[in-house]
């Protein structure tokens, strides 16, 4: 394990145990088995250390969702199965990273310091989600009634909507159950051939009504 990773592991433990405000560089250095000066060689402040911890959590969550999607796809899962597995894996990792901490709300509020990281990894997650949809469509030709990007945007709204119904994501099993129902319902509704545009259907109907039985061969 590299010194940097040892520091980040130790810092994560300290932040979970004491929260952000009551944690210190000295505590993180002690937990990592380093002097304060040695830790400052890698991070120049508590804020920089916290930011690095947050980024590693996001990186690991992204890796978890990619692995889950690939595994479900190899197992022959359908589009809904793959996307549910992908999103569940990401959220499970993020939740587990702070599981058991008495300072969860404070730590989540401090994530505002790293808003740019959230936006960066949200974009990467969206790119992964749309890539998954496109890949599955190319292999299995499941029709969609909307553009890939629009479907992913609706999926993100479904995730956020379910989160709003469970502000603290508790009870967790109920949160994931309702989220899966929302996602599967959404994906099922989006699947299938694109509907014929109304104008085209109207023209076809008018043409048919003008055609007399005797005119047909």
Image (spheres, grey):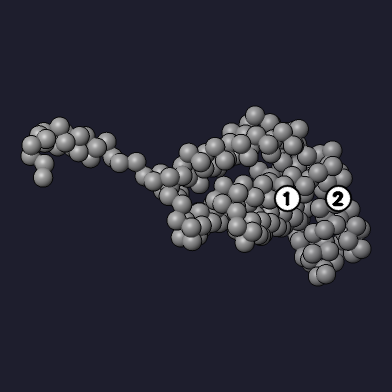
Label 2 packing within 10 angstroms: few (<14), some (14-19), many (20+): many
Q: Please name whichever residue, 138 or 34, is drawn nearer the observer in this view of the structure.
A: 138
Q: Is residue 118 visible?
A: no
How many marks are shown on the rendered structure? 2
Residue 202 against residue 14 in the figure, above or below: above
**Where does residue 169 sit, x and y in percent of width and height?**
72, 35
**Where does residue 205 sit, x and y in percent of width and height?**
20, 34
**Where does residue 73 sit, x and y in percent of width and height?**
60, 58
Q: In the drawing, does residue 185 fall left or right of residue 101? A: left
Q: Which of labels 2 and 1 is toward the front?
A: 1
Residue under numbered circle 1: 93
Residue at the location (61% across, 36% down)? Answer: 181
Q: In the drawing, does residue 178 fall left or right of residue 128? A: right
Q: In the drawing, does residue 180 fall left or right of residue 104? A: left
Residue at the location (72% across, 47% down)? Answer: 92
Q: Which mark is residue 4?
A: none
Image quadrant in which the C terminus is located: top left
Q: Which mark is residue 14?
A: 2
State the SS at label 2: helix
Q: Please name whichever residue, 172 or 10, is drawn nearer the observer in this view of the structure.
A: 172
Label 1 packing within 10 angstroms: few (<14), some (14-19), many (20+): some
Residue at the location (63% across, 40% down)? Answer: 180
């Amino acid at each position: 394990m590299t010194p940097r990773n040892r520091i980040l592991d130790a810092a994560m433990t300290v932040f979970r145990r004491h929260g952000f405000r009551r944690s210190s560089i000295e505590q993180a250095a002690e937990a990592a088995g380093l002097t304060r000066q040695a830790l400052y060689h890698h991070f120049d402040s508590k804020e920089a250390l916290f930011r690095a911890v947050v980024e590693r959590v996001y990186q690991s969550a992204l890796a978890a969702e990619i692995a889950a999607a690939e595994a479900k796809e190899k197992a022959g899962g359908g589009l809904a199965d793959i996307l549910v597995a992908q999103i569940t894996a990401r959220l499970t990792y993020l939740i587990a990273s702070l599981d058991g901490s008495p300072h969860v709300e404070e730590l989540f509020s401090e994530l505002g310091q790293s808003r740019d990281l959230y936006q960066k990894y949200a974009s990467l997650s969206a790119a992964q989600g749309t890539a998954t949809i496109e890949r599955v469509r190319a292999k299995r030709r499941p029709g969609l009634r909307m553009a890939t990007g629009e479907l992913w945007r609706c999926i993100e709204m479904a995730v956020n909507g379910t989160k709003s119904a469970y502000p603290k994501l508790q009870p967790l099993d109920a949160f994931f159950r309702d989220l899966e129902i929302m996602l599967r319902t959404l994906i099922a509704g989006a699947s299938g051939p694109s509907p014929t545009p109304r104008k085209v259907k109207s023209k076809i109907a008018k043409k048919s009504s003008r055609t007399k039985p005797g005119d047909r061969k």
